[in-house]
């Protein structure tokens, strides 16, 4: 499957958030992971078996809830001849709402990566760990450790470190063993070291060139050898360009790889947010302009600008938790739209119709996450959408100073 778009990632994140909140009164929430290679027929027989076993559950309500969840999954399975490309996950069950009440929830999720193991679980919570693990950014970094004695080549994929090559050198130590003239010894040592670096450079280049999407290379090792190696450009020029930085490590073996990743982690997370920083900087620069500013912010203005099709990029805070709802009066058909926060929605007081003033309250006929609403509007006019993550300085100022919604216009417009 192609890389998920930001939007798809966001939608999936929100679904996971929602699923996390579901609690069963007993063990009655079913999570089912079906790998792409699994036959639907086999899944069905598995469920049939679970169905008959669940009839032994002591509590009547729990049994009823489990059985109806299994039935619901089985009927949903009917539309598949085979699992989708990455398999399919079902989260189905009765979550507890208020008091004694429960409410049936059913999610069908096509994961961003192939499911590896078939898994059925019935618990009081949904089993989300395998799905969450797929959400971790799978960025690839090259890892390279070197000194005059050892060289280790590896890659970091997501959180996993793979050792790919380990080599040791024949370069003698710095001090002569006597017998030879010191100068001659030193010259031979330097030749041996040079050959060692050439060999390491070639091997590392070969390994890293074969990895397609390497984001950057982290170089480590004790002492100054690593800097020398980088400065003398022993790596292929394409790989050389990807070097992020050098980091001190105590070891140059497999253990050193872990050291390298932990010492470089701060640098790597700042790389990730540097893209967001750039965008926020561009926006803030526009905000301060007194004439011909391209900045636009706040929900109302952004919506207007999007409808006019004049926005180049919108920046949305990932922690915006707002919904756009449509209220409708069933007597006179009067409708209006409002934006409400998640909390407001949870305790929503339905208003009376301002037009006909019947005793019936208005109803919510549409509800959309405001990030989805803006993304839809943006798509229509090929405006770029960037989600700014929470917890960063930029993300926080976007949320607090600009309502979590900002944009950069294509040209100055009076709104
Ligand atoms: Zn009305």
Image: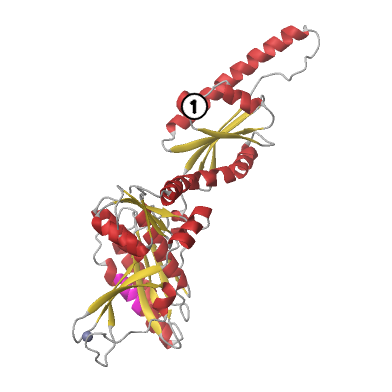
- What percent of the width, then of the height, locates residue 4? 36, 51
| Snapshot colouring | secondary structure
Q: Quadrant of residue 126?
A: bottom left
Q: How many marks?
A: 1
Residue 378 in sight in this render: yes
**Does 285 appear above or below 192?**
below
Residue in the image at 53% along x and 57% along y? 391
- What percent of the width, then of the height, locates residue 240? 50, 27
Q: Quadrant of residue 232?
A: top right
- What percent of the width, then of the height, locates residue 389? 47, 55
> In the shown orientation, is residue 38 left or right of residue 179?
left
For the residue pair 95 and 351, the one nearer the viewer reads as: 351
Question: Secondary structure under badge 1?
Answer: helix
For the residue pair 378 and 60, the one nearer the viewer reads as: 378
Magenta segment boundaries in residue numbering: 68-74
Magenta span: helix, strand or loop, mainly?
helix
* The image quadrant in which ligand 1 is located: bottom left
For the residue pair 174 and 276, the one nearer the viewer reads as: 276
> In the shown orientation, is residue 163 left or right of residue 398?
right
**Does 174 appear above or below 264?**
above
> In the shown orientation, is residue 201 left or right of residue 83?
right
Q: Which residue is mark 1?
A: 205
Residue 109 in sight in this render: no
Find out whether residue 411 is within the magenta segment: no
Residue extending farthest to the right is 178
Find out whether residue 71 is within the magenta segment: yes
């Amino acid at each position: 499957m192609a890389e998920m778009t930001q939007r798809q990632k966001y939608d999936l994140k929100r679904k996971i958030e929602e699923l996390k909140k579901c609690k069963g009164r007993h063990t009655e929430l079913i999570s089912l992971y079906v790998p792409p290679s699994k036959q639907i027929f086999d899944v069905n027989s598995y469920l049939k078996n679970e169905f008959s076993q669940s009839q032994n559950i002591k509590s009547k309500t729990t049994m009823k809830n489990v059985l109806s969840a299994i039935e619901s999954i089985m009927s949903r399975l009917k539309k598949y001849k085979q699992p989708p490309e990455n398999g399919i996950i079902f989260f189905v069950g009765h979550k507890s709402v208020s008091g004694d009440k429960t409410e049936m929830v059913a999610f069908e999720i096509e994961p961003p990566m192939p499911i590896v193991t078939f898994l059925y679980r019935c618990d009081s919570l949904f089993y989300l760990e395998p799905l969450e693990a797929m959400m971790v950014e799978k960025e690839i970094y090259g890892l390279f450790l070197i000194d005059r004695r050892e060289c280790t080549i590896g890659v970091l994929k997501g959180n996993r470190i793979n050792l790919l090559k380990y080599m040791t050198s024949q370069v003698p130590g710095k001090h002569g063993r006597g017998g030879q003239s010191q100068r001659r010894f030193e010259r031979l040592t330097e030749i041996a070291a040079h050959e060692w670096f050439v060999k390491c450079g070639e091997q590392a280049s070969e390994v890293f060139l074969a990895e397609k999407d390497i984001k950057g290379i982290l170089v480590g090792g004790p002492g100054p050898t690593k800097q020398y190696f980088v400065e003398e450009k022993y790596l292929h020029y394409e790989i050389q360009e990807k070097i992020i930085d050098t980091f001190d490590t105590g070891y140059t073996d497999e253990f050193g790889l872990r050291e390298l990743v932990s010492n470089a982690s701060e640098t790597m997370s700042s790389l990730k947010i540097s893209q967001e920083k750039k965008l926020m900087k561009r926006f803030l620069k526009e905000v301060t302009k007194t004439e011909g500013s391209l900045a636009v912010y706040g929900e109302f203005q952004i919506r207007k600008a999007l409808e006019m099709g004049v926005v180049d990029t919108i920046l949305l805070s990932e922690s915006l938790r707002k919904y756009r709802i449509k209220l409708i009066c069933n007597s006179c058909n009067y409708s209006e739209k409002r934006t409400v926060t998640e909390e407001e929605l949870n305790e929503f007081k339905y208003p009376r119709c301002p037009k006909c003033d019947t005793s019936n309250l208005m109803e919510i006929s549409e509800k959309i996450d405001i990030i989805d609403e803006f993304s839809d509007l943006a798509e229509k006019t090929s405006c770029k959408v960037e989600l700014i993550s929470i917890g960063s300085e930029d993300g926080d100022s976007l949320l607090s100073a600009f309502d979590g919604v900002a944009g950069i216009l294509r040209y100055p417009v009076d709104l």
